[in-house]
Amino acid sequence: MGEPILTPAIIIILFIALTVFNIFSKTDFSESFRKNQAKDMGSNGNSFMRKLEKRTIEKTKYSKRNKIETQCKQAGFPLKYYQYYLLTIISAIGLALLTFVAIGNEYLAVEFLFVGRIIPMQVITIIRNKRIEKLEQQIGPFLDMSIKRYLSTKDFEKALRLTKGEFKGMEPLFTELKLAIAELDSKTPVTEVMDNLALRCNNKYLERFSDYYKIASSIGTQEARENLLTQAYLQYEEDRSLKQMLKKELSEPVRDSYIMVISVPLFASFGFIAMDGYGDFLLNQLTGKLMLAGVVGVIIAIIWFINNKIGGPIK
């Protein structure tokens, strides 16, 4: 009887099993953990998340955690890094298993094990870009109203509270203003509230407006305050006009890029329908499996480039 051979299918199953083991090996999957699990399932879930949070804090640089958490906030999803990390693991394993079961291509499944790790961030990036684009259209009127109310009331906190109501129903700015007012209600200094708002909106002119407010609040004359704060608004409007022109110029290349990406699966579908043996070649033969994995990898790389470079917010 011949010796057992490690087929590609067994290799990918072992690979996924090792990945899962590596993730959870140093967590509380011990005898004491199992006893606690039998005692209280709810607290165990919380215990696991706390351990995962502690592990990611210990193993991941603060700069990386802060960057990802900031991107999630700007997309409207205030995820902590450990929650995002868990999401990427679930995405990777789930996508790899689904690909292997549905298509039977072990090479594509291994590829998707890694692709699944980046998909959550790509989805977040797409949502973030669209959200920031909407915010850029709404921040101008917000700055204008806030300045006028501040100059009349001489109370910036009051000006923010009054301005919030003007944007009811205008998302996503209204949600961000509600968060800002909630911070004010919790006795957070107004300067910190404005800094947080600028960070969540990813707008350098809102950040500049916050800095100008700090300076204006220490200047005694009404004219000096008006000139300084109005300058931030004028700079924003100038920048917005320039960005609109650049977006118009970039819209065609972005559209053409997506058309090129979409054309690949369309041609592949045509091959399945019109060419005998084409589907069998791609799905069952070694050369076809490798070619399919390679093409999918290239498509994913192109989509990443479009989302993060061409289609991203203009700075």
Image (cartoon, rainbow, N blue to C red):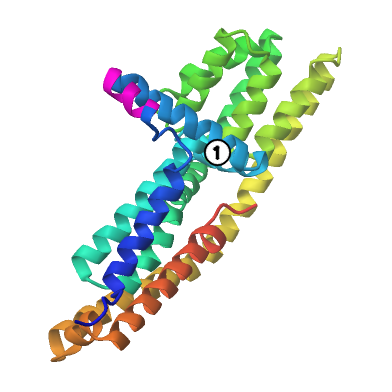
Name the residue that disc number 1 marks. Answer: 56
Looking at the image, residue 213 sits to the left or right of residue 54; the answer is right
Q: Residue furthest bottom?
A: 276
Between 130 and 296, which is closer to the camera in this rendering? 296
Q: Is residue 73 above or below residue 287?
A: above
- Whole-percent x, y for residue 76 in the image: 46, 35
Q: Residue furthest front?
A: 1
Between 177 and 19, which is closer to the camera in this rendering? 19
The residue at 59%/23% (across/down) is 145
Q: Which residues are magenta?
A: 32-39
The residue at 52%/65% (across/down) is 305
Quadrant location of the N terminus?
bottom left
Query: Dot 1: what SS?
Result: helix
Looking at the image, residue 208 sits to the left or right of residue 254; the answer is right
- Whole-percent x, y for residue 137 in the image: 52, 40
Q: Is residue 280 magenta?
A: no
Looking at the image, residue 62 sits to the left or right of residue 19; the answer is right
- Whole-percent x, y for residue 131 in the image: 47, 42
Q: Is residue 289 above or below residue 89?
A: below
Q: Amino acid at mark 1?
A: Thr
- Whole-percent x, y for residue 87 in the image: 40, 43
